[in-house]
Amino acid sequence: MEICKERSRIPVISIVGGKSNSGKTTLLEKLIREAKRRGWRVATLKHDVHGFEMDQPGKDTWRHAQAGADIVAISSPHKIAILENVAEDQPLEEVLARIQGVDVIFTEGYKHGSKSKIEVFRSAVHDELFSRLEELIAIASDISFDNGIPCFGLDDAEGLCDLIEEKYMVSRGV
C-alpha cells in the first residue's frame, strides 16, 4: 500500500482545450521545459482515442507481439518501454497508478477527466471556455478573463509552474 500513498501525493494536472489545434501540446512542451529547469521529475500521459503504434514492423519486439505476447517490454541503459495489449480504454486512475517517482504528472487528452485542469484558450480558435470553472486551476490564453480563475499568457510557463509549485507544494529538485 505504500505505493498507493506515494502515488496519491503526486499532483496530476490536465492540459485541456475545447478543440484540436488549440495549443495544448505547445503549452505542455513549455511546461515540461520549465519544470525540468526547476529540477522537477515530470511524467506526461497522453490519451489517444484513435489508438497508436509504437513498435516498428520487423523489429524484435514487434515480432514478439505478432507471436502473441500480451505484454512486450524493451529495456536499454537509457529507456524502458512496456507495451501492453488491453481489451478496452483504461480508466485514468488505473493508468496513473503505474506512474511513480515523479514530482508532477501532466496529462493531455483527458478533458472529461476529474483532475485539475489548465485550459488553453486561443481567441482565433475558441468561442468560449470548454471546462467548468470549478475544474480549472488556470487558463492559458491570448486574451484576459475576469472570472476569478488565474489567467496566464500562452507562453507563461514560468507563471504556471509558480502556481503549480504554490498550489501543490511541488519543490525544486525533489
Image (tube, grey):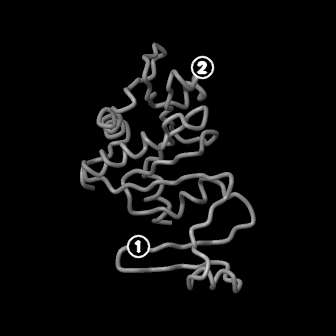
Between discs 2 and 1, the one toward the N terminus: 1
Residue at 42% over, 39% down: 27
Q: Nearer the viewer, residue 28 or 3?
A: 28
Q: Nearer the viewer, residue 79 or 5?
A: 79
Residue extending farthest to the top is 146
Q: Nearer the viewer, residue 25 or 114?
A: 25
Q: Amino acid at mark 1?
A: Lys
Q: Which residue is mark 2?
A: 127
Q: Which residue is mark 1?
A: 79
**How far across and down, in percent of the image, does residue 113 sit?**
61, 42
Mark sitting on residue 167: none
Left/right of residue 99 with respect to residue 112 in the rendered view? left
Image position of 106 with respect to 41: above or below:
above
Left/right of residue 70 with respect to residue 13 in the rendered view? right
Mark 2 and mark 1 in contact? Answer it, CB < 8 Å.
Answer: no
**How far across and down, in percent of the image, does residue 163 sit?**
34, 34
Count of picture labels: 2
**Label 1: element kind:** loop
Q: Nearer the viewer, mark 2 or mark 1?
A: 2
Disc 2 to disc 1, how far (Cα)?
A: 41 Å
Residue at 43% over, 59% down: 6
Q: Amino acid at mark 2?
A: Asp
Image position of 112 with respect to 84: above or below:
above
Residue extending farthest to the front is 58
Residue at 63% over, 84% down: 63
Residue at 47% over, 65% down: 3
Q: Quadrant of residue 71?
A: bottom right
